[in-house]
Amino acid sequence: MFEEYLEDANYLAMEASKVANEREAKRYYRVAVFCTMSAVEAFINYIGDTLAQGETFQPYEIAYLTDKKFDVSGGTFQILEQIEYHRLEDKLKFLICKFVPDFDFFSTPCWSRLLEFKKFRDTITHPRQDEDEIDITEYKKKIETGLSSAIEIMNYLCKGIFRRPLRKKILDLIL
């Protein structure tokens, strides 16, 4: 599903760049932003579900990735039926540290750009103003860097976890 969301984000951003009406273009860009971040979340869920099928990882690691609450009670570890959400960037950090140990969070631009893009998504999701005052050029710049950063981080993880890159059709989604 994450691949479809990435393709949708790319398509919507391309459509936005063709539209003359600013309000309509912003509509496309906003949805492209949402699709991109949904793709990242779907990717993490995919990784969590994939790792859960094997028996290589600790139950608390799988619980953490799949948003299950876990606890130690009476000296025994238990996965509870309750949901406990963890921040997207924390799950990504966990996966990167585990599977891409030479990844440098400070000097690899895609990491800071993705965090910046997430903040941008958050401002759109939780607006403080009645009107969308974000300039159309900012939308365009943010989706270009956000989509490429999301794909780059996913690619690092695919190489680290599966020993192969993302599919070429996804790597080619460049705005």
Image: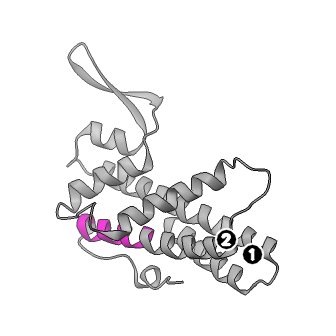
Q: Mark 2 points at which residue?
A: 29
* Above or below, comparing residue 32 to residue 93 in the picture: below
* Residue 71 badge: none
Q: Is mark 2 on a helix, strand or loop?
A: helix
Q: In which quarter of the image is residue 25?
A: bottom right
- The region drawn magenta spans 150-161
> To which residue does mark 1 refer?
25
Q: Is residue 81 left or right of residue 33?
A: left
User: What's under tag 1, amino acid-wise?
Assistant: Ala
Local crowd at mark 2 within 10 Å, few (<14), some, or many (≥20)? many
Question: Hey, which residue is sitting farthest left in the picture?
Answer: 102
Measured as percent of width and height from the top left, residue 119 is found at 52, 55
Residue nearer the viewer, 118 or 84: 118
Magenta stretch: residue 154 in it? yes
The reply, left or right, for residue 16 in relation to residue 80 is: right
Tag 1, which secondary structure?
helix
User: Residue at position x 41%, y 35% from top?
Assistant: 68
**Total count of labels:** 2
- Residue 162: quadrant of the picture: bottom left
* Residue type at tag 2: Tyr
Q: Is residue 112 left or right of residue 120?
A: left
